[in-house]
Image (cartoon, rainbow, N blue to C red):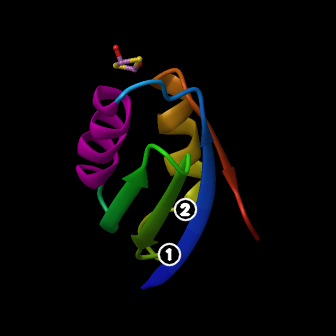
Amino acid sequence: MKTKHAQIKGMHCAACSGRIERVVSGMDGVDEVAVNLAAESMKLSFDPDIITAEAVGERIKDLGFEALFAS
Ligand code: 9UX
């Protein structure tokens, strides 16, 4: 399991962060996701054999937000 942090741009209310958490937590290989609206951040734990941070970022982009992962 791998943990990565990202900055999330474009969130304006708690429904935004809730939507990201719900969708990302449903992705195969995602173990845990926590989005902090006020801090505009996300903590993501995932299995790198199943999913990449890039794929999660793309999914978040599809929702209308931007995820910038720290390396
Ligand atoms: Mo809140 Mo977010 O009204 O896409 S749901 S701004």
Secondary element type, mark 2: loop
Residue 25: percent from left, percent from top: 27, 54
Name the residue: 57% across, 59% down.
53
How crowded pointer 2 is (Cα within 10 Å; few <14, some 14-19, many 20+) is rated as: some
Image mark for residue 6: none
Secondary element type, mark 1: loop
Name the residue nearer the viewer: 10 or 27: 10
Label 1, on which residue?
48
Name the residue nearer the viewer: 49 or 3: 3
Mark 2 in CB contact with mark 1 (< 8 angstroms):
yes
Looking at the image, is 29 positioned above or below residue 40?
A: below
Residue 18: percent from left, percent from top: 27, 38
User: Does 23 sit left or right of 47 as displayed?
Assistant: left
Name the residue: 57% across, 38% down.
58
Looking at the rendered image, the quarter that the C terminus falls into is bottom right
Q: Amino acid at mark 1?
A: Pro
Name the residue: 49% across, 36% down.
60
Label 2, on which residue?
52
Q: Amino acid at mark 2?
A: Thr
Occupied quadrant, residue 1:
bottom left
User: Does 36 sit left or right of 67 as displayed?
Assistant: left
Looking at the image, is 64 positioned above or below residue 19?
A: above
Q: Which residues are magenta?
A: 14-27
